[in-house]
Every structure is written in C-alpha cells, then in structure tokens.
Amino acid sequence: MVNSLSAWFGFLFLASLTLEQNLTDAAEPIPDRLVVLTFDDSVASQFSVVRPLLKRYGFGATFFITEGFSFPTNKVDYLTWDQIRQLHDDGFEIGNHTRDHLAVSVGTLGQLKEQVEAINTRCSENGIPKPVSFAYPGNAIVPGALPILRELGIRFARRGGAPEHPYEWGRGFAFEPGKDHPLLIPSAGDARPDWSLDDFRRAADQARGGKIAVLQFHGVPDREHPWVNTRPERFEEYMAYLRTNAFRVIALRDLAQYAGTETVPADPLAIIEARKTEHSEILVDGEIVDEANGKLLPARLYIRGADGVWYFPKSASAVGSAIRYQRRSGFNTNAVEQHTTLSAHPFRVELPQGRYTLTVERGKEWFPVSREVTVEPGMSKVVIPLRRWINLAELGWYSGDAHNHRDPAELPNVLLAEDVNVGLPMVDWTTVSTVAPSVSGKGFAGDFGSGPVTVDDTHVWYPRNTEYEIFRTGNVDHTLGALLILNHKTRFETPVFPLSVLAQKARAEGALVDLEKHNWPWSMALVPVIKPDLFELANNHHWETEFGVRNWAVPAPAWMGLNSGTSTERDWTMYGFQTYYALLNCGFPMRPSAGTANGVHPVPLGFSRVYVHLEGPFGYDAWMRGLKEGRSFVTTGPMIFGTVEQQFPGGTFAVTNPAQEFHTACEVRSEQPLESIELIVNGAVSRRFDPQNTRTPEGAYQTKVATGFKPAGTSWLAWRCFETRPQGRFRFAHTAPWNFEVAGQPLRPRRDETDWLISRVNEEITRSQSIAPPGLIDDYRKALAAYERIAANAR
C-alpha cells in the first residue's frame, strides 16, 4: 500500500519500445457516466460484503488478486481460491496483482514476469482464465514495466492517482483514451476511510466528455490495511449513488468495448506531467503540536477560505487518520459545524492560493488557536502550537460524552482529538414505538461486544447504549420524546412499551436511565414511573455554533419567566436548570449528565461534557460508578470544583443539630472571564458572587469563593457559574448536588413547581390518549397520582 514512485528515467527504456498503434478498435462511443469498479488485495469482505451488493445492482467489477500479506494463512481477512472462483463464475473479472504484492520499481522489474505468471498459474489451477488486467501493487509505477506486461498478455493496467495527486489523498483523474496509455490507466479515486459521498462523487462525476472514471477500492472493511478501509455503510452509499444516477458500471476488461487501445501515446508520461500543472492547488503541510514539548497532538481543525468555503485536511501519515465532520441544523441553517478531527500525525490539505483561517481546538482544557495563513507557492510548513490552561486528569477528573451518535469506527480518532475520556454512543436507536432499537436500522451494524473498548489508558468507549426517541406512535406521526439507557449488558430487543419492561431490564443489567431533554412531551410523565438516574443538564441543544433549536416542543411555564424557554440560548439553559431543580425538590434524586448527539447535530463531540472525580486511577467501571453517585459536574466551558466540608459533589449529610453550619467552597477556572458564580439551595439562588477572575500562570482565569450553609430542613445545594463569551454568547458549569437530611422535616417543593408538573402530565394525557397505547396512559395516570401526592406537601 505504500506509494513508491520509481525514477522516471525508466522512460528511456520505453522510448525504444514499439507498440502497435491500433491493437483493437473501440466498438462503441464512450458514454457519459461510464465507471469501472476495481478491488485490490484479495480482501475477504469483497466476497461477503461487496459481491452481494454488486450483484443486486447488476454492476461489473474487477477483483485484483494477490497472495501477498497473510493471504496463505489468514482466511478471516483474505479470500479463498474457492471464493475467487465464485467471483469469476458470477461474471466478475479476476485481475492480476502479483503473487507477493510486489511494488513495481526499476529494482524489481526482473521479478515482475515471475510474479505475474504465478497468479496466472493459480488462476488456471482454479478454472479461471488468464487475466488480461493488472493493477500496480501499492500504485507504484515505472514505465519499464509496460513491455513486460504487454508480453504477458495484459491489455489494461490500472495505477493510482499519483503522481498527479499525493498518494494519501486518494484523488485522481479519469482515464482519457488516446491520452492515457492503456497500461497506465489512472484511478479517478482511491477510496479512503475519511471519504465522504462528496469525495466519491468528485471521482465518479469525472465520467463525462469521453472520460471514464476508474475507481479503486480495497476492503469493505479492510482490517489489515486501515488506511484504505471503506466502511460497508459508506460503500452502500457510494453504490446507491451510482445506481440512482444511472451510471454504467463495468470491469476493467470491458474497456475494450469502448476505448480499446487504438491510440497509444508516443510519450506515456506526457499526460501525467500535463495534469500536474492543471490544478492550481498548493499542497500545504501542517502539524499541531503541544507548545510545552513539541509533540504532535490529536485535535479538531477548521479551515475556511476568505470566500467562506470550508476545506478538510487529510492525514499525511499512512497510520494516521483524519475524519471530516459536516452538519447543518435543520432548524437554523446558520448553525453549521465543518471540521476535521486529526490523529497525532502531520496533516496535508490542497488549497487554492489565497487567504485562509485555520482554527484548532482540543476539547475543553486547551486554549483554541486561530491563525491567518496565506497559501502561496513555496510556503513553509504550518505548525500550530496548542497550550493547556488546565489538566483535569492530574486533579482526578475525567470527562465523558454520555449521549452521542458517532460511528464506533470513528471514536478512536474523535475521542483523542476532543480529549473525551469516556464515549457512550447510541449503538441502538429507534424512532418508532413499535420497532425495537436492535432492529430499527438507525443504529450501527456490527458486533461490538458488551465490554468497554480501550483506545488508550485514559480513553474508552462502551457499545451497549440505547436510545428510544419516539416520533411515531403506532401508525401515527405523534412525538413522545426520548429516553436513554446507558451501560447495559445485552441489546434491547423490544419496543418501547411497556415502559416497565425497559426499566426492569435496565435495573437488572446495572444500566443508567437518562431522561435526555426536559421539554419532550412525555418527559415529566416519565420521571415518577421509571425514576431516571440522570438528567441531561448540558444537552444536545447546546452548540458551539449559533444556537439553533428555537420554539421547540413544550414551552416553559410562566413562573420561570423565560418566554418559550427555547427562544434563546440562555432561556434554554435556564429552562433545563429550573426543571431539574423542580424534580430534585420533588424528591427525585437525579444526577446531572451531559451529551451532544454528535453524529447528528452540528456540534463537536464533548462540547457538552460531564466530568467525574475518581479517587484512584482511571477506569471505565469506576467512572460509571462516579457518574451514578453524582461525583460530578457538567460543563460547556468553565471548570467548577465545589466542596461541602471538603467533600466533592454527591455527598449526603445527616443534620442532627438545627444550628449546624456546613462550610461550602467553590473554585472555578475558566478560559475566558467569568460572569458570575452562584450557590443554589433548593432550586433558588441563595448567594451570587462577583468573580475575581485572577489570572493563572497558564493564562486562564480563577475565582475562589466560600460561605456557610445552615439547612432549614431537608435540603440540597449545588454550585453553578457562567462564563462570558464574545457576541453575547456564554458557557456554564454546574455541579451535582449535595444533600442534607433532617429527620422529620422532608424536602418540600414549591407550589408552582408541583402545579406545573401536574399540568404537564394532564396535558400529555389529553394530547396522547386517543393515540398512545392504553398502558402508556395508565403510566401517565400513575405519574399524575405521584405528583398529586407530592403536591400535598408543597409550600
């Protein structure tokens, strides 16, 4: 797979070569949308995944066979000869890729004939015709190979997109018969793991005006060669594009029907050299490094031209990764997220000459950096240093995104780039009340196991997480809301109803139930019925880009003073806070959580995140215990460290003396100046502190406050803070609560809180009773009765 372009002085050998100028005459004119599919390296998934899809669509293809790598012994990742024969019997072309995957160079030309003949022999032994098509292993080419291939009966030979484009990009040019030598046919595209449909379209759509797009794939997936891996769902997307847009898809041998080899250029390298000058892009090399030690860092990179166009870099390393992320809000088209997450390797990007803004971020604990760059010939490498302003792991705090929809295949890259220690992707997901999430097709296919997947010593993701997000109830479009089940052991193979079954299974498997967002129609009715463990206080409507989801779902009550509660970013945040406080006051001890729905929404993974404090070393199970116990805070920016009697959040204190006073303190460190720090007692601001905003040695801001607290009956308290951001934006952090228990003096909610919760449930019963199943309405009535009992003690 390594691109090794040999010296072009091999052309001198070719100059003395006489090739017929009219080997065959093309029988048909070249139509637009003519595509050749090719698959290299004898990967087993070409039989199990690629073959059925191509047969379904009636597509032709060439499979280039080699016995290199671990082909002789590894029949998990590589084809058997029986499978190769079946591909031939199915009508696909079997091409030659040399016995040992030999890179073709001046130094290996003496071995080329034997290498090709070895595959020819194996084909003959298995009843497969002698191949007439060849693919250069690793896309390494040298003109001296042409007479050897010609002598061996090869009519068409496919190379990659280099040297016109860098090998790592997988980009190329369409085949132009008469200009391209038939034994040096370029790949219009060589699929890469970070390819999007746009990359595929860029390659395939070159098939017009007498040009033929030859497309190169490897494994679908490819475990042994991840730098050329294509995910099955992405491959299906590519093939659907070809089918939907009426492309004609053939094997390489079938070029004889259209192009033949009637015109062989006198100089086979001329078109290659000409193409190098056709595009005006400059290849920009760059690195993101730790300012403290110069080591390469994984990070998130934005590249935007002065004209507003976004660009997406690739990794410059064969073992690196670069994953493009492009999302636009359907509620607010100005809310966009256009970035690339990079592994800790150099990157490359092709840019037209001009001015660009490069912005680099890495999670919450590093200062973001923006740099203006002029792209011009001869420019030097772009090196962007990042500087930490805090290291939470050194303090025993580890972050998580407890609600995301990121493809598990991408998480090793993204968790490190965003420095999220724990990722909980919704591997199973349903949006229909009658469909189980395990079979909905909305989640991620694959067997991910039922244990944590380690990325490195402090970064891990867990696959058993499920979302029930009901937009269709029975056969009617009728939104109920969402519910997350985190950290379970087996898949949820039943629909959402009855709710009691879900709750019982979740508890039996040690899972945590997350209420998700607070203003779904059913949210408040669920709480007394299933008793969620978590409340998504920093949720997936908090974005780094422009706030987008306005006037959505159930509005806030008048007593909150927030208009609809969703018209502004701050109103949305306060709506969530006050709902959470009302439920705590009613005796539902939910702990705060955070998630982004990254993978769906225009927001980076971990923009909203929850930090959990661990006494010992990092571990997934310990982190989940800490989340359940509330040893945590959530944040979209600042870091908040509250204590009561030197205990972190989640503690419970027995109050035996009415005069007893508890010492509580809060320290906040933030990238930008704080707006305020507030002590919350039983849902109300007990005390507001003006921040000191003292500069730290790292260049961040720090504020420390402390006060005493005398519980007047059973109570809870928490700390929160707000950080000022440009253009009227803000970010916040909020601790989990501490609880204070006074015997004989239960916590009493406010009357407006209980009245509102009762009205929410009544409204939902009225709205859904003619649509929802009777069992759900029964659950709603149980919730109503529970709130009415609580209201009897309201103040």
Image (cartoon, rainbow, N blue to C red):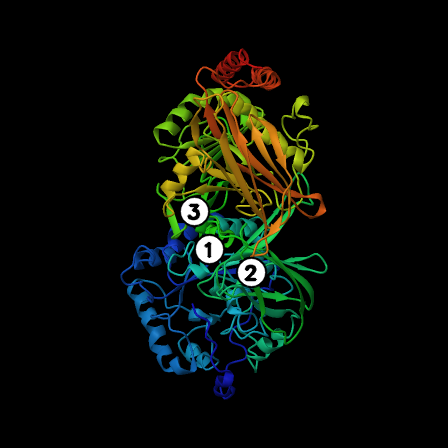
Disc number lying in front (3 or 2): 3
Could you say which is closer to the camera, residue 770 or residue 420?
Answer: 420
103 above or below 463? below
754 above or below 303? above
Does residue 24 appear to the left or right of 674 in the view shown?
left
Residue 17 percent across, percent down from the top left: 49, 86
Q: Disc 1 and disc 3: Cα gap in Å?
A: 38 Å
Name the quarter where the C terminus is drawn: top right
Q: Secondary structure at mark 2?
A: strand
Badge 3 amino acid: Gly
**3 or 2: tag closer to the N-terminus:** 2
What label does residue 386 carry, if any?
Answer: 2
**1 or 2: tag closer to the N-terminus:** 1
- The residue at which mark 3 appears reads as 396
Residue 133 makes an appearance in the image: no
Residues at marks 1 and 3 touching, judged by CB atoms closer than 8 Å: no
Q: Residue furthest front?
A: 659
423 above or below 735? below
Residue 646 percent across, percent down from the top left: 45, 38
Badge 1 amino acid: Thr
Could you say which is closer to the camera, residue 460 or residue 278?
Answer: 460
- The residue at which mark 1 appears reads as 230
Q: Disc 3 and disc 2: Cα gap in Å?
A: 22 Å
Q: Residue at x 31, y 54 (%)?
A: 76
